[in-house]
């Protein structure tokens, strides 16, 4: 079993992170139970029905020329596979969730007050986080995954005949008189699956911004995307993928005073979704205390050096290597020996393969991640899985070396912080989240040195492999895309730090999910 898993992970070896779909056994079990209950409700068997799934779900109609109700029923079983990754929300939760006709749950974010800000919706299980964008002359609304590990962006095309496209909103010539399809092919591999189609150009609107943008329009979309509510992926990486770099397009649109984006992720069990992504400035209402920054590693990924991790005040000595900050990944992944050292500090932790660890369900201590001398806490609500049918709980930190010699920190971590992605000064900043509930105090400074840290990683090749966590992305295209521009600008609300690396800083506050095929 472990050999098969390692072989699968090898498919994603790359210097470019992206959608990384990992679905651990406990999540498969929860998904199977959830969909069994839904199917029993639909067929009239059992009494789960509305009472069991009433979480203020809101319906979002799929604007497709094809009927999707039958397709959704046929695909229900597939959602219990390794690519399905949503665990059921707790029954006491009160929150607003949209439920599409194709049976996708969407926990809609509250409408933000600030300018250049959009709500971050999620699937109701903290597994994926996405924004609603408008594309084309008719402003067709589509969900796009926010993925700081992906350099490519695409949406499902109206000419796509794949099962996944039949269950999602699609985009095509009938939706816009300004759509220009270049006819030039693109293809992006996601583990055992892929998307492919042609590169197109049209107007994209998000967070009060509107600009012309090149993106992929798929004609083939693999089955793992049947499991997700979003209609495409919006790549927020600094690297160049199969199409025009999104952050570069935002920068050249001249909508921002500073090229930053900030992400605040909601935790479903906390209730109302107050998650958001803001461009150009930070939102002081979404974080507690100060934002502390760490310089990016060399290269064009959102990667910074991890100083260490600890449990209950005891350090694991697992730092000194890069850490990729990836909203497209649900969990945390690291080298097997480092993950083993960390779990060695947790009383009762056990693993048969040094990859997946069971932990006592009543563990109540925070894990901490240390960047630039500052500890950022991870709540047990996030690093411990829900209890399985057998009564066991699994750690959401997995010993899979997705990126060689590096950590991959996804939504398990990001739900606990407000994250600022600064392209101008090539740095990432964190503060304690003001969105998710926590018993923690402000982040703790562990050293007297408050300066940034920096390291180095290799730049990605022109052909890369992307994670589906979405995770690693490998793409092919007949066109060449320009590297991200290096706009200038300052974040007046953030401390001034060395700009030794003129990266594309946009302030983004998001947490996102990881899936594994």
Image (cartoon, rainbow, N blue to C red):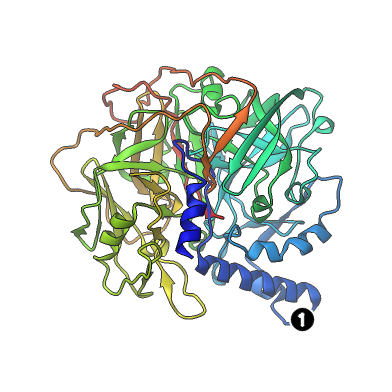
Residue visible at 44% across and 36% down in the picture? 15
Report helix, strand or loop for mark 1. loop
Q: Is residue 131 above or below residue 316?
A: above
* Quadrant in which the C terminus is drawn: bottom right
User: Residue 286 lies in what quarter of the image?
Assistant: top left
User: Residue 377 lies in what quarter of the image?
Assistant: bottom left
Q: Nearer the viewer, residue 304 or 438?
A: 304
Question: Which residue is tagged 1?
Answer: 45
Residue visible at 66% across and 62% down in the picture? 79
In the image: residue 372, left or right of residue 480: left
Q: Is residue 117 visible?
A: yes
Image location (x, y in percent) of residue 319:
25, 47
Q: Is residue 181 above or below residue 170?
A: above
User: Residue 424 lies in what quarter of the image?
Assistant: top left
In the image: residue 270, left or right of residue 130: left
In the image: residue 170, left or right of residue 379: right
Check disc 1: other Cα within 10 Å, few if <14, some if 14-19, many if 20+. Answer: few
Outermost residue, left side: 448
Residue visible at 32% across and 62% down in the picture? 439
Image location (x, y in percent) of residue 236:
51, 34
Q: Is residue 207 visible?
A: no
Image location (x, y in percent) of residue 484:
49, 21
């Amino acid at each position: 079993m472990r050999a098969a898993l390692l072989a699968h992970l090898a498919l994603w070896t790359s210097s470019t992170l992206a959608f990384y779909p990992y679905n651990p056994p406990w999540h498969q079990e929860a998904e199977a139970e959830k969909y069994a209950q839904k199917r029993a409700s639909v067929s009239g068997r059992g009494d789960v029905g509305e009472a069991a799934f009433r979480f203020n779900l809101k319906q979002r109609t799929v604007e497709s020329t094809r009927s999707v109700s039958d397709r959704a029923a046929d695909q229900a079983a597939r959602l219990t596979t390794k690519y399905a990754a949503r665990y059921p929300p707790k029954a006491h939760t009160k929150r607003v969730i949209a439920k599409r006709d194709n049976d996708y749950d969407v926990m809609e974010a509250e409408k933000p007050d600030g300018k250049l800000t959009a709500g971050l919706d999620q699937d109701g299980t903290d597994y994926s986080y996405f924004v609603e964008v408008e594309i084309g002359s008719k402003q067709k609304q589509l969900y796009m995954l926010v993925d700081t590990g992906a350099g490519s962006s695409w949406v499902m095309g109206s000419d796509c005949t794949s099962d996944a496209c039949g269950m999602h909103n699609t985009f095509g010539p009938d939706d816009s008189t300004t759509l220009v399809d270049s006819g030039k092919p693109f293809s992006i591999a996601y583990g055992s699956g892929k998307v492919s189609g042609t590169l197109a150009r049209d107007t994209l609107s998000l967070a009060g911004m509107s600009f012309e943008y090149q993106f992929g329009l798929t004609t083939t979309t693999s089955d793992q995307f049947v499991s997700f509510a979003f209609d495409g992926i919006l790549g927020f990486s600094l690297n160049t993928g199969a199409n025009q770099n999104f952050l570069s397009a935002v920068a050249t649109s001249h909508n921002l005073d500073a090229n930053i984006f900030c992400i605040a992720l909601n935790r479903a069990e906390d209730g109302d979704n107050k998650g958001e992504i803001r461009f150009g400035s930070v939102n002081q209402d979404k974080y507690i205390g100060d934002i502390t920054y760490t310089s990016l590693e060399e290269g064009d990924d959102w990667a910074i050096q991890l100083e260490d991790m600890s449990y209950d005040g005891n350090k694991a000595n697992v730092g000194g290597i890069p850490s990729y900050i990836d909203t497209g990944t649900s969990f945390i992944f690291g080298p097997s020996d480092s993950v083993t050292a960390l779990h060695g500090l947790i009383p009762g932790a056990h693993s048969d393969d040094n990859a997946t660890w069971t932990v006592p369900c009543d563990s109540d201590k925070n894990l901490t991640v240390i960047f630039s001398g500052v500890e950022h806490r991870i709540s047990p609500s996030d690093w411990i899985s829900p209890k399985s049918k057998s009564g066991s709980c699994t750690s959401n930190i997995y010993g899979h070396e997705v990126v060689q010699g590096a950590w991959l920190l996804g939504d398990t971590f990001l739900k606990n912080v407000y994250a600022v992605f600064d392209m101008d000064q090539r740095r990432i900043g964190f503060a304690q989240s003001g969105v998710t509930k926590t018993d923690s105090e402000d982040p703790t400074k562990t050293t007297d040195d408050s300066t940034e840290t920096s390291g180095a990683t290799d730049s990605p090749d022109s052909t890369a492999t992307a994670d589906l966590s979405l995770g690693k992305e490998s793409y092919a295209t007949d066109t060449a895309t320009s590297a991200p521009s290096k706009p200038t600008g300052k974040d007046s609300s953030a401390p001034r730090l060395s700009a030794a690396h003129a990266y594309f800083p946009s302030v983004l506050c998001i947490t996102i999910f990881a899936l594994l095929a």
